[in-house]
Image (cartoon, grey):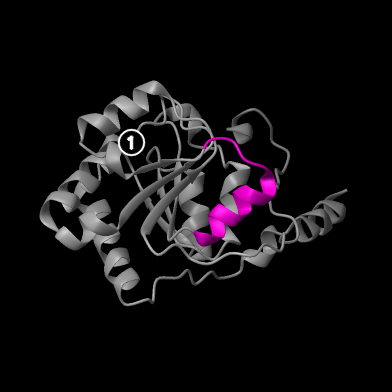
Amino acid sequence: EFQQITNKPIEVITNGYDAETPVDFKLDSKFSLAHIGSLLSKRNPEVLWGVLRELVNENNDFSKDLQLNFVGSVSDEVLKTIKKHNLSGYINNIGYVSHRQAIMFQKKSQLLLLIEIDSEETKSIIPGKLFEYMVSNRPIIAIGPNDSDIEKVINETNTGNYFNYKQHESLKRIILEHYKAFQNKSLQSHPIGIQKYHRKALTQTLSKLL
């Protein structure tokens, strides 16, 4: 975008993460999917709710194990859509918590949900939450627009999977794979090269450019 308005070389420095906050936690016994932060009406991935509804209907064990942890505010529209898919009973609506408690929920939940608005304008947005998710050592399920910079970071660091709002079958397959790993007690993240996103490393990169 900036390359269209200048001939000067451009370097982009992303957001990043600070040193880990030590917290005591134990992984959820449920197959928990956690969203940390505000789940606004425009962040309402019906593809996800549809996939979860199908898996609940098709798999009795999945139906018994599923839990949706919402840490932060959730819009009424999102709650109505979830209710439409008969998933309201799976919600653990936690509300606002301290940052330390939010980190605890990130680390103890089985999967982490990152939802971005499906629009052209959000393709280049990388929320700071992504970097905190990356160091939680839990697999990320991200949903957003096609050709998103979030997808590039997740693929580069091997920290999860990215889907657009129409990839129903691919999303269902991955969630089912994660569920089987959860049943085998082998569900975990295998990040690669996330150290480059530590704020200390990003500051060093910035200092070299000045």
| 119 over 209 or under it: above or below | above
Query: Residue type at mark 1?
Result: Pro
- Residue nearest the viewer, comparing 144 with 137: 137
- Residue nearest the viewer, comparing 204 with 54: 54
**Left or right, 148 with reference to 194:** left
Residue 17, by quadrant, is: bottom right
Classify mark 1: residues with Cα within 10 Å, few (<14), some (14-19) or many (20+).
many
- Callout 1 secondary element: loop
Residue in the image at 29% along x and 64% along y? 179
| 60 over 42 or under it: above or below | below
Callout count:
1
Residue 143 highlighted magenta (yes or no): no
Residue holding disc 1: 45
One can see residue 82 in this view: yes
One can see residue 12 in this view: no
Residue in the image at 54% along x and 66% along y? 137
- Residue nearest the viewer, comparing 123 with 33: 33
Residue in the image at 32% along x and 65% along y? 178
Residue in the image at 68% along x and 58% along y? 197
Residue 8 image position (x, y, % from top left)? 73, 39
Quadrant location of the N terminus in the rendered image: top right
**Left or right, 28 with reference to 85:** right
Question: From which residue to which does the magenta span run?
Answer: 95-108
Name the magenta segment's main secondary structure: helix
Residue 81 image position (x, y, % from top left)? 28, 28
Residue 101 highlighted magenta (yes or no): yes
Residue 25 image position (x, y, % from top left)? 58, 64
**Left or right, 48 with reference to 27:** left
Residue 82 image position (x, y, % from top left)? 28, 33
**Left or right, 186 with reference to 59:** right
| 191 over 50 or under it: above or below | below
